[in-house]
């Protein structure tokens, strides 16, 4: 956290109902300063995926870097590259709903299409394997008329499902750090970024 004078102040209340406008302005300012660290926290969380899920040819970190590298080399825009890098970051704490974690991280900062893709990528990934386990690989078809169906299908087909190759020459995390910084230092919920798509 930056060492601002506000950092050393503490609000007057012990119950939120007793807080004053000055208290909440102080907390708002401190929260804003704290969220300047968000890009570094996101990169650290992705880096921790080097210790998750046995049995794959690459770690989740390797998979994440590979997915983002493929997106970048295909000419994807920075929001999609960031989405590709962090799409599985929820695997550690939400192994049965991981797509919701990454979507929630992205939602205040990127266009709705990108959040939608990440929120639905687990369902669309089912197409590649879930029939082997008795599931319905065509679950994604319920969205076949959705305007972002094709974008999510392509995200999975071209970048996600094929990124388990230990011989793929992916970029290092440092390649993506400036992209993560540019996106997650934007003002949150800014209509210039989150609407449309
Ligand atoms: Fe995933
Ligand atoms: Fe993935």
Image (cartoon, rainbow, N blue to C red):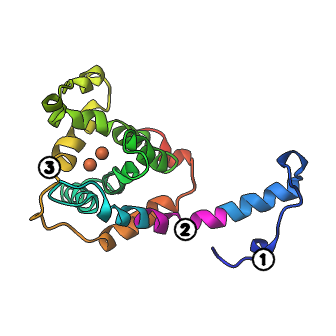
| Residue 38 lies in the magenta-colored region | yes
How far is mark 2 from mark 3, CA to CA? 32 Å
Q: Earlier in the sequence, mark 2 or mark 1?
A: 1
Q: Is residue 151 visible?
A: yes
Identify the image quadrant of the C terminus: top left
Q: Quadrant of ligand 1?
A: top left
Residue placed at 89% from the left, 53% from the top?
20
Q: Residues within 10 Å of mark 2 (few under 14, many from 20)?
A: some
Which residues fall within the magenta stretch? 32-43
- Crowding at dot 3, Cα within 10 Å, few <14 / some 14-19 / many 20+, comes out as some
Residue 54 placed where, x, y %?
Answer: 23, 55
Left or right of residue 88: residue 33: right
**Which residue is the site of mark 2?**
37
Residue 145 is drawn in which quadrant? top left
- Label 2: which secondary element: helix
Is the magenta region chiefly helix, strand or loop? helix
Image quarter of the N terminus:
bottom right
Q: Quadrant of residue 34?
A: bottom right
- Residue under label 1, please give it: 5
Q: Is residue 128 left or right of residue 28?
A: left
Task: Please report the residue visible at 43 percent of the width from the left and 41 percent of the height from the top.
Answer: 100
Q: Residue at x 9, y 65 (%)?
A: 167
Q: Are marks 2 and 1 in contact (CB under 8 Å)?
A: no
Mark 3 = which residue?
Answer: 162
| Secondary structure of residue under mark 3 | loop
> x%, y% of residue 55?
18, 54
Q: Is residue 133 above or below residue 37?
A: above
* Earlier-in-chain disc, 1 versus 3: 1
Is the distance from the Cβ of mark 3 to the nearest ligand 2 atom less than 8 Å?
Answer: no
Label 1 crowd bin: few (<14), some (14–19), many (20+), radius 10 Å: few
């Amino acid at each position: 956290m930056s060492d601002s004078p506000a950092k050393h102040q503490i609000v007057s209340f012990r119950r939120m109902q007793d807080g004053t406008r000055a208290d909440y302005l102080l907390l708002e300012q401190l929260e804003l300063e704290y969220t300047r660290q968000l890009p570094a926290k996101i990169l650290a969380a992705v880096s921790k995926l080097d210790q998750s899920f046995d049995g794959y040819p690459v770690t989740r970190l390797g998979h994440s870097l590979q997915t983002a590298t493929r997106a970048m080399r295909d000419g994807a825009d920075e929001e999609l590259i960031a989405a590709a890098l962090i799409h599985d970051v929820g695997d550690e704490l939400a192994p049965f709903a991981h797509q919701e974690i990454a979507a929630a991280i992205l939602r205040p900062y990127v266009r709705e299409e990108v959040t939608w893709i990440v929120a639905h990528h687990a369902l669309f990934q089912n197409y590649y394997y879930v029939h082997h386990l008795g599931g319905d690989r065509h679950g994604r078809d319920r969205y076949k008329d959705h305007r972002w169906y094709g974008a999510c299908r392509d995200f999975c087909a071209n970048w996600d499902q094929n990124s388990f190759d230990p011989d793929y020459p992916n970029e290092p995390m440092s390649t993506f750090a400036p992209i993560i910084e540019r996106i997650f230092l934007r003002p949150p919920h800014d209509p210039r970024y989150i609407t449309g798509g």
